[in-house]
Image (cartoon, rainbow, N blue to C red):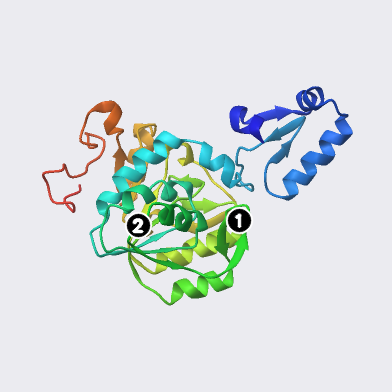
């Protein structure tokens, strides 16, 4: 797993040489790790990269695209007002929002992601935390299933933030697993405002299970790695797209000509 975090793919031959074992042993161990959802076997080796039917493990997702997620999170919290209720899904992009949420007073945070609870508690945050029940899934460190969906159906939130592995520029958002697709669909249905956090690596992708159309999102926030054609394709669906800028690197306000979004001096809702 450390090799995969560093390089994304490894070969059977490399593993044989590194650990001094046979190819048969390597294949057996890769089968066991794949069964646990840690990695995906491919011809001649293994990868932690997602496919249309496989989502990367939490550990790999946490190590991937860290800068883009942090930039998107900084942009996302601008949509949150003190005293509001926010729903965070079990994505690592939403997890990047937690340190910023601790600075906003009187929040109620609803989540199925235990990593959000752990991160917020470690920062002595003052928000109320409402954690859904459900079946614990080790791969995501989150609560999923029918119990989770039922718990979500009994609340209403001001704003829902979620991320997905695949954003098709025409047909909407997708996930590799049906149980994840159902829970995210339930989250969308209980929010007054729904915001999709999608770094550029997720754009123009598809996975097995459809979640929602682009028109079900009020905003999509992506990063500067998104090409202009992808951004315009998203906007053509009628959704408001914000391109988050790394302010620490750019020395800017986080808005620009690609954002179509309000500057800090304008009202928050003044978006093209």
- Total labels: the figure holds 2
Find residue 177 and name its label.
1
Residue under label 2 = 125
Q: Secondary structure at mark 2?
A: loop
Q: Judge whether 94 appears above or below 112 on screen.
A: above
Residue plotted at (48% across, 74% down) = 151
Q: Is residue 41 left or right of residue 223?
A: right
**Within 10 angstroms of label 1, few (less than 14), some, or many (20 or more) residues?**
some
Distance between the alpha carbons at the discs numbered 1 and 2: 32 Å
**Within 10 angstroms of label 2, few (less than 14), some, or many (20 or more) residues?**
some
Q: Report x, y in % for residue 52.
A: 61, 45
Q: Report x, y in % for residue 58.
A: 57, 46
Q: Report x, y in % for residue 185.
A: 47, 63
Q: Judge whether 62 appears above or below 17 on screen.
A: below
Q: Quadrant of residue 125?
A: bottom left
Q: 62 or 231, which is in the foreground?
A: 62
Q: Report x, y in % for residue 195.
A: 35, 54
Q: Judge whether 104 appears above or below 3 on screen.
A: below
């Amino acid at each position: 797993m450390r090799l995969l975090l560093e390089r994304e793919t490894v070969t059977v031959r490399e593993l044989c040489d590194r650990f001094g074992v046979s190819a048969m042993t390597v294949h057996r161990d890769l089968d066991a790790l794949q069964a646990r959802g840690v990695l995906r076997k491919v011809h001649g080796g293994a990868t932690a990269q997602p496919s249309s039917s496989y989502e990367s493990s939490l550990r790999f997702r946490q190590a991937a695209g860290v800068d883009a997620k942090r930039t998107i999170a900084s942009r996302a919290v601008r949509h949150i007002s003190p005293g509001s209720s926010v729903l965070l899904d079990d994505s690592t992009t939403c997890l990047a929002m937690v340190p910023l949420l601790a600075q906003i007073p009187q929040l109620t945070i609803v989540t199925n992601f235990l990593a959000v609870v752990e991160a917020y508690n470690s920062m002595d945050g003052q928000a109320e935390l409402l954690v859904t029940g459900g079946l614990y899934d080790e791969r995501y460190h989150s609560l999923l299933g029918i119990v989770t969906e039922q718990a979500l159906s009994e609340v209403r939130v001001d704003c829902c933030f979620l991320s997905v592995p695949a954003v098709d520029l025409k047909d909407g958002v997708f996930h590799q697993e049906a149980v994840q697709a159902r829970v995210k669909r339930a989250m969308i249905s209980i929010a007054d405002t729904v915001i999709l956090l999608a770094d550029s690596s997720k754009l123009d992708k598809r996975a097995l299970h459809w979640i929602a159309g682009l028109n079900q999102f009020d905003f999509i926030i992506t990063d500067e790695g998104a090409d202009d054609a992808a951004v315009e394709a998203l906007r053509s669906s009628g959704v408001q797209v914000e391109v988050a800028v790394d302010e620490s690197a750019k020395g800017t306000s986080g808005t620009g000509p690609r954002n179509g979004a309000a500057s800090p001096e304008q009202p928050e809702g003044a978006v093209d």
